[in-house]
Amino acid sequence: MQLQPLTVRGASFRDSAGREALLRGVNLGGDCKLPYPYGGTNFPTDFSDHRTVSFIGRPFPLEEADDHLGRLRHWGFNVIRLLTTWEAVEHEGPGIYDEAYLDYFTEVCRKAGEYGLYVFVDFHEDAWSRMTGGSGAPGWVFEAVGLDFTKFHPAGLSHVMQLKYDYALGGRQDSYPQMTWGSNHRLSPSGIMWTLFFTGRLFTPDFLIDGINVQDFLQSYYIGAMKAVAVRVAKFANILGFDTLNEPVPGWIGKQISYRHLRPTAENPSNPRIGLALSPLDNLLAAQGIPVSVPRILRDPDTGAFSVGDEEIINPDGVSIWLPGKSCPFEAAGAYVIKDGSVAALDEDFFCKSEGRTVNAAEDAYAPLFDGVGTAIQAYNPEWAVFAELEPYSIYVGGPFPKKMPAHSVNASHWYDSSTLYTKSFNAERAYDFTTGQMLYGREAIKASYVKQMHDIAEISKTFGADGAPTLIGEFGIPFDLDGAAAYRAWQKGDRSSAPWQQHIEALTLTYEAFDELKLHGTLWNYTTSNRNALEVGDGWNQEDLSIYSVDQRENSDDPNSGGRAVEGFCRPFVRFAQGDLVRLSFAADRRVFEAEIEVNGDIEADSEIYLPHLHFGDRPVIETTGPSATVVYDSCAQCAVIRASTGRLQIRAQPETIL
């Protein structure tokens, strides 16, 4: 299938004919954060091979590309957020690119285009790196700034599954509870690296590496890795652009040096992260091998509510994480002093002000990175979009995007129903709204909450210049191991019906109904080809399991739905292209009725295209139109209706020929 390039025009994506495009897709995939084939967190490692690893085979070996990309196209997706990492491209050392991996990644992008899939490239990270319990940066960056990652775990300053989990025991373990990888954001190594990456010029102006400031050193190599990919894929029409950086955390900017965030306040209304409530100074002292006593933030597993636990001694053995001969650049810059065994904070506002000016994450951290990414990638294709992200959930507490965004920017914020994500349960009649702290009763109330939260995200897109920008929710999704993985047990016992997946189907249905109401673009998290129905494996990363595909459920190679989970929830009809402007769309899954409205521009010499999957409509859907004259053709093989109409407001209704 020959795809036409899409470009950002105001608040929409348009093709060369002028049609409005609606992008609905998936993240490919969760295990791309990790080396292939044995780099998943379900395998132990001490990361000593970090310079010689390979990511070739993520998201799949090339010989499997047709199978997986064909399945994604069959399910109606028309875009993928394709994951890579800085480490995948540049693991061997500064400026040394893995050319074989780049060849491989380029071929995945090309093959995606053959299957009618647009691609935007996501340089992914979580909690900075694999060595700090997440993914992203290569190991050599720690050495470059003077940190010894082999000391993070002995110092108690990292929460890493591969170093805390008993692989002989298997299953879920108290030593590494689910969804605790995010606690690494609160620990010294991540805090130090993020602060240097984003604001080294502000806070440590004299910290130089190879003669340049640490911030410029880190960002130039990060963007250099992105450029190494960009030059390879610039020739492909299906490449939409690049993500700035997945879920970036701006470090300690704006935080008082001794402040511990224990609960929402007027100055900081965000919920605290679970884990140790360390202040920047606590972190910096612990990094130097000085024990500190701090409280732990807890989350109720049933309600998700936060509380403050007992204090704990951090780094009681006094292990320094700095390499021999290296020292803390923030102490050198005058943030604090250690003298004669005593500690003093010299400047409580060290991370809040620079040269007398109050600093903030939007303008002093995110803006320079966004500008750098935009300049770099648009040198290869001036029309490429910049898919911009902030720290997750920051938009709910007033964390704005920069005032001036790069050309062709897209609001690529993430959204999850936090209640479902953290409690790993879903009830369509009763749910807790993390954003308001209120209980919701009934399907419509839950849906309204989803719509409100997503609407708030989309409203921010209006600030991206005079004409606004598209909103593409870069991540959303649900855990498939709900209720202790009850669906997996039912599968193992032989239940192949949709009954074990009804919670998942209903949660996804409500989510997509909100997407339809707001006409949002989105890429579902995620499709992982190596996913297993095993609690210690899942997506191969920190016991997470949000994949809509599992190899354990793949039983019939001739059935493209085989391996899919809760397919009825995400395989839904939508308007891929509108011959003009898309006014509205909706799908009543219980009645299998799809409706859409398009303000047709008859001067556009290209069809509207509507995906109507066999799963809901059979192979001969009944398609009715009212309004201007229109011709309708349904391509059963492509599961797609093409409609050409004259100028006017066209209303479309589709339903099965007979009850399925």
Image (spheres, rainbow, N blue to C red):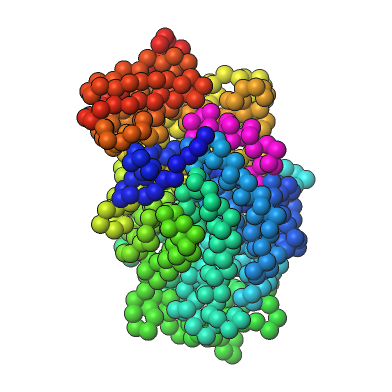
Whether residue 74 appears in magenta in the rendering, the answer is yes
Residue furthest out toward the right: 168
Asked whether, in this view, residue 465 is left or right of residue 202, the answer is: left
Asked if residue 628 can be seen in this view, the reply is: yes
Vertical side of 629 occupied by 208: above or below? below
Q: Tell me which secondary structure the magenta stretch mostly adopts.
A: helix
The answer to whether residue 389 shows anywhere in this view is no
- Examine the structure image and report whether residue 205 is included in the region drawn in magenta: no
In the image, residue 473 lies at what x, y percent?
42, 46
The foreground one among 83 and 50 is: 83
Camera-side residue of 392 and 292: 392
The reply, left or right, for residue 72 in relation to residue 591 is right
Foreground: 502 or 243?
243
Q: Which residues are magenta?
A: 58-77
From the viewer's side, name the closer residue of 518 and 14: 14
Measured as percent of width and height from the top left, residue 350 is found at 43, 79
Q: Which residue is drawn at the image coordinates 44% and 18% (left, top)?
A: 617
What is the residue that sits farthest to the bottom in this orientation?
Answer: 340
Q: Is residue 647 above or below residue 623?
A: below
The residue drawn where x is 62% and y is 65% is 157
| Horizontal side of residue 220 vs 400, given as left or right | right
What residue appears at the point 54 percent right and 65 percent down from the top-left corner?
223
Question: Outermost residue, top direction?
Answer: 658
